[in-house]
Amino acid sequence: MTTSMHANTSKSESLGYFARRPWLWVVLAFVMLLSAWSVLFYIALNNQPEIVPLKHLTIP
């Protein structure tokens, strides 16, 4: 009877760190979403349109 050592060829080992931890992709997606919203709000707050005074119309 011969014994042979098999190399670890499982698919999850060969795919890497993130493939074995899919919840990290969800966390990464939320971080990217929040950072994109933060950038959009920052740009919008620093580039507000000019305030235009409105005249009140009186109805006769």
Image (spheres, rainbow, N blue to C red):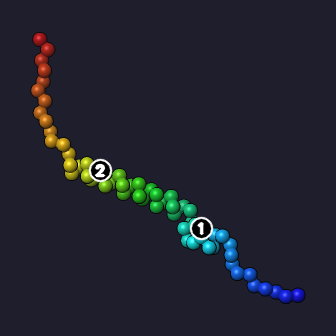
Image quarter hosting the N terminus: bottom right
Say which residue label 1 marks: 20
Q: Position of residue 22 (x, y in %)?
A: 56, 62
Is 36 positioned to the left or the right of 55 in the image?
A: right
Considering every residue shown, the one lying at the far bottom of the view is 2
Density class for disc 1 (Cα within 10 Å; few <14, some 14-19, many ≥20) is: few
User: Considering only order in the chain, which callout, 2 or 1, is on the residue closer to the N terminus?
Assistant: 1
Density class for disc 2 (Cα within 10 Å; few <14, some 14-19, many ≥20) is: few
Q: From the viewer's side, name the closer residue of 31 and 13.
A: 13
Is 42 positioned to the left or the right of 32 in the image?
A: left
Considering every residue shown, the one lying at the far right of the view is 1
Looking at the image, residue 16 lies above or below residue 37: below
Q: Residue at x 31, y 51 (%)?
A: 40
Is 4 positioned to the left or the right of 32 in the image?
A: right
Q: Residue at x 11, y 11 (%)?
A: 60
Looking at the image, residue 41 lies above or below residue 31: above
Q: Position of residue 4 (x, y in %)?
A: 79, 85
Based on the displayed image, in which of its 4 quarters is residue 50 positioned? top left
Say what amino acid the circle numbered 1 marks: Arg
Q: Residue at x 41, y 58 (%)?
A: 32
Say which residue label 2 marks: 41
Say what amino acid the circle numbered 2 marks: Phe
Q: Residue at x 54, y 61 (%)?
A: 23
Is 17 positioned to the left or the right of 35 in the image?
A: right
